[in-house]
Image (cartoon, rainbow, N blue to C red):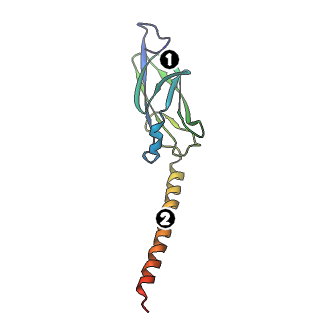
Amino acid sequence: MYPGQQQGAPGGAIAITTKYFWLAFLMGLFKPEISFNGQIVAKAWGRTVVPVPAGQHHVHVHVPYLIPSRIGNADQGVTVRPGETVEIEYKAPTIAFLGGALGTPPQKFPGMVATWIMLGVALFIILCACGGSLISIASSGSTSP
């Protein structure tokens, strides 16, 4: 039962699903803090269902981290009717200095375009470095005195 909810009072629930991008696997070491109306209700990745009284609720999610100490801040107002379970989704950013995405599913990972560009540039540099080495090895081995 949600703090402050009276026994037998009509209520509902908020089901929040928290996710991080698979390439940011280190994010799995840090559990997101989920708070409703300023009270922490869960610290977990995945789906969490929290019973709440009917009415308007403020949902906040962030991931405690190293530097900066909080990443992916996201806030959302949620209205819950009696007997209703409201589904919302949080996706952590792919770049630490961005906010998270919170709202009705499906949400997109913030920073994906920049992440794919950085991965493409890194792959290009690796291929150029390895390709240059392979070409020089092949050309030095093909010449005979």
> Left or right of 83: which side holds 62?
right
What residue is shown with label 2? 126
Closer-to-camera residue (55/126): 126
Q: From the viewer's perspective, is residue 56 above or below residue 110?
A: above
Quadrant that contains the N terminus: top left
Disc number for residue 106: none
Question: Looking at the picture, which amino acid does disc 2 mark?
Answer: Ile
What residue is shown with label 1? 55
The residues bearing labels 2 and 1 have C-alpha atoms spaced at a distance of 54 Å
Question: Looking at the picture, which amino acid does disc 1 mark?
Answer: Gly
Specify few, some or many for label 2: CA neighbours under 10 Å numbering under 14, 14-19, or 20 or more: few
Is residue 107 in view from this perspective? no
Q: Classify mark 2: helix, strand or loop.
A: helix
| Nearer-N-terminus badge (2/1) | 1
Image x and y of residue 67, in percent: 59, 40
Q: How many marks?
A: 2
Is residue 78 in view from this perspective? yes
Q: Residue at x 47, y 67 (%)?
A: 127
